[in-house]
Image: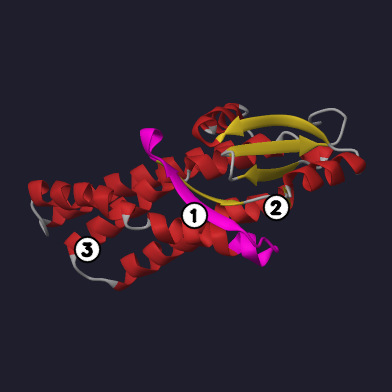
Amino acid sequence: MMDKLVESLREQGYTEYARFSFSDMLVPLQQGLKTGNIYAITFFIFVILGFGGIGAFIAHVLLTDSLSGLRLMDWLLRSIPATLLLVPLHELIHGWLFRWYGAKDVRYGVVWKKLMFYAVAHGFAVNYKQFRYIALAPFVVISLLLIATFLLVSGTPAKALLLGALVFHTLCCVGDFGLCAYLYRLRHRQPLSFDDADQNVTYFYALPGLESENP
């Protein structure tokens, strides 16, 4: 399967731009974030807004004396393990989008040493536009669900838990935003990405030419 895919891409004029083992995927996402392009900036804006929201929420709770400071911090800290419960949904959304675009062999896994969870489509190439939807769909869907629930519940502890989960889940999406930023640099070369789940390697292919007119 992989040989046929690579041969097909080469016939279309594509060449290998980079490859990374699943355990080394921090490298391209870091490179993407360092570019400071629209995806990197958007991620950092959401993080700043999230922590700003927590700060405003803490100030409101303490000023209204609706919950003690210690109990408030306790509920905010509980949102960290609570965020881990969102991981299966996060990865399933990735998987659903892969299948939506036609992938037949979707696999899930984790790199325990780096606590990196992933969903990949074995031997299925996605272009830049498809990639960004697959990558960012979990952030959008889960953020909207948490915000809607936050607005509907009335208890301060529940709101603290949900707000904390929203912020920590946003932080967990750094890889999704980083990889989008990585591919964004190559958008004028019509980049493609595909995974070899048997060898635990992700490939990036692109047409010859300049990386980008506006990195």
Give the CA separation, mark 1 to mark 3. 21 Å
Residue 42 place in picture, x, y as percent: 55, 43
In the image, 186 versus 205, the foreground residue is: 205
Magenta stretch in the rendered image: 97-115
Q: Specify whether 127 is left or right of 208.
A: left
Residue 102 place in picture, x, y as percent: 70, 64
Q: Mark 2 or mark 1, which has the lower sequence index? A: 2
Give the CA separation, mark 2 to mark 1. 22 Å
Residue at image point 61% right, 55% down: 134
SS under mark 2: loop
Residue type, label 3: Ala
Residue 156 place in picture, x, y as percent: 18, 62
Residue 10, compared with residue 146, is above or below; it is above
Which mark is in front, 1 or 3?
1
Residue annotated with mark 2: 124
Residue type, label 1: Phe
SS under mark 1: helix
- Extreme residue in the bottom direction: 152
Which mark identifies residue 158?
3
